Image: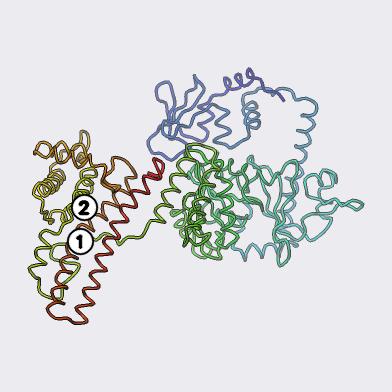
Amino acid sequence: MSLSPAFLDELRARTSLSALIGKTTKLQKAGREMRGCCPFHNEKTPSFYVNDDKGFYHCFGCSAHGDAIRWMTDQRGLPFIDAVKELAQAAGLEMPAMDRQSAAKAERAKGLHEAMEEAANWFVEQLHGLGGVDARKLLERRGITAETARRFGMGYAPDSRGKLKAALKEFGEPMLVETGMLIQVEGKEPYDRFRGRLMIPIRDQRGRVIAFGGRILDQGEPKYLNSPDTPLFDKGRTLYNLDRAAPAARKANRLLVVEGYMDVIALAQAGIAEAVAPLGTALTEHQLERLWRMVEVPVLCFDGDAAGQKAAIRAAHRALPLLQPGRSLRFVTLPEGQDPDDLVKAKGAGAMEALLRDAQPLVDRLWQNEVAAEPLDTPEQRAGLKRRLNELAGTIADPGVKHEYLAEFRRRADEQMRPQRAPFQPFKRGKQPWRPPVPVTEDAKKVRATGIDRVLAKAVLAGLIRHPAEIARHVEVLGSLKLADGALGRLFEAVVDVALEDTHRAPPRPGTQEAAALDSARLVTILARSGFEGIASDLLRADTMPYTFTQKSGDEERARADLDEAIAILIARPEVDAQLAEATSAMMARFTDEAFERQVSLVKEKQALDARLANLVQANEDARSLGPEGN
């Protein structure tokens, strides 16, 4: 069949777009257009417009845009040719004539659909007949209500090799073999494929039966038996329950992917209608594309056992090459040994909703899997982790998304392998972290008064000027510091004073109630008015300072963390030195094991502070070696 541009233009011209969309979306007149709440994303204020004159719709919220055919494919989920056929029928247009081969194929497909529909009806009759008692008991044991069974068209295949063949004999054995309902073995009579099983029809996007899944009633293998691939059914392109889940997913802006039929049915019975399932295979690229046509970030909710989690990571790897901006996956990890069916039966839909609220982003699932793959104790193992992560990101086709994944994996690996530091604890007045066992000596008092590391203090001050938002977090500590250097000390006090005044007195930004944030340039300007322009500028030009927080650019989060660490060291160092002086004086006055152990402990404390400072220098060297992407 050939669809010419002229035919498609005529079809669009004969279709009232507002009437078509108005069947499922409430629209109101807005000038020459119609307006309503967008059916493609949740919103309370209408931003979705339909223009009949120009023949298109557009949402100013989510940028959904298209014509009548696009509406049928995107909102209704129909294949292109089916969308055209339905619109042409409604508009009274004859579809272009098919060639002989296409016409014969279409006629045959029509017969196959009719045979499948008849088979589905016959299975339903058997479920409610005398022979279906065991199948009904299975439904009862699984908690499936009669209404749910009816809604999903569930039936029963008697344990017989020929009853279905006899019931559908009008279609002929060749057609029943082609649909997969009969098995043909060379030299033998065809016989029924499904025997002694609970039957679950599989439908296409238009709701037509195209295949079946059959569950064994008691023990036996296989537990589930699916139809083979046929002219109607391609298991790698089909998702169970897609016809019902698609409209529910668009309404909820959420789509769940679970492992099996019973999970889908149990969730629907519990009120979660937007679930689909693959059909006995891992998720394929075609199935992923179908999912993304409905929502940008489907949620994969596989079983909590090892097999389910392996299936989840396989899906994650398969999705990577297909990622695009805004298009990804999220993952729910179910309790060990449970599937969605078990969970909602035991704890209700609320338990499932709680898990869905905490669904894990794709990047987190990939990172978690690779970090758990092997220990990270040696340089070789850590290099292996980085290589695996780079290989994963390298499979992404979209260059922008690939760049973001490379940067994110690099950042996480850097954080994972960075030496651990003691967390920063803000200093409180009246609460000292160390209490000397002896009275404070004059030597200790001198150390406390002059013991601030002037080089580190300059670096911290430069970091605070570059990152003024950090001043408020440490204002109590910074305000208590006394610096021996007069000019440096005065600048320290001025920086703290400016930050305090800005916090309390900054005027709201125009049109907001929020005060303007104190940035580095504004802080320097204010300091210049107080006569500190020279020393502040000198500090900011000090590129020789070996810390991330003194650099002009880099990883903002890492710089703030390193600045926190530097302030902690700046505060702790004089106190350790003072206590070491006290312990040394006490030991010289009277040597005891306790005094000696105290001195050794404080020496180790001082060495630990030196090591933490060295780590900060190393962090800056690492950032420089990684270059712009590493930052």
Q: Residue at x 64, y 62 (%)?
A: 139
Residue at the disc numbered 2 = 456
**Callout 1–callout 2 Cβ contact below 8 Å:** yes
Mark 1 vs 2, N-terminal side: 2
In this view, 141 is above or below 98: below
Is 615 left or right of 450, judged from the image as shown?
right
Q: Secondary structure at mark 1?
A: helix
Q: Nearer the viewer, residue 174 or 65?
A: 65
Q: Quadrant of the N terminus?
A: top right
**Dot 1, crowdedness within 10 Å: few (<14), some or many (≥20)?**
some
Amino acid beneath label 1: Arg
Q: Nearer the viewer, residue 395 or 196?
A: 395
- Total numbered badges shown on the rendered structure: 2
Is residue 517 visible from the viewing direction of this image? Answer: no
- In percent of width and height, residue 406 lies at 47, 44
Is 92 left or right of 328, judged from the image as shown?
right
Is 380 left or right of 499, judged from the image as shown?
right
**Dot 2, crowdedness within 10 Å: few (<14), some or many (≥20)?**
some
- In percent of width and height, residue 10 lies at 61, 19
Q: CA distance from mark 1 to mark 2?
A: 11 Å
Amino acid beneath label 2: Leu
- In percent of width and height, residue 182 lies at 81, 50
Q: Secondary structure at mark 2?
A: helix
Residue at the disc numbered 1 = 573
Q: Residue at x 75, y 33 (%)?
A: 106
Q: In terms of image quadrants, where is residue 477?
A: bottom left
Return the mark for residue 212.
Answer: none
Is residue 94 visible from the viewing direction of this image? Answer: yes
- In percent of width and height, residue 349 lies at 49, 58
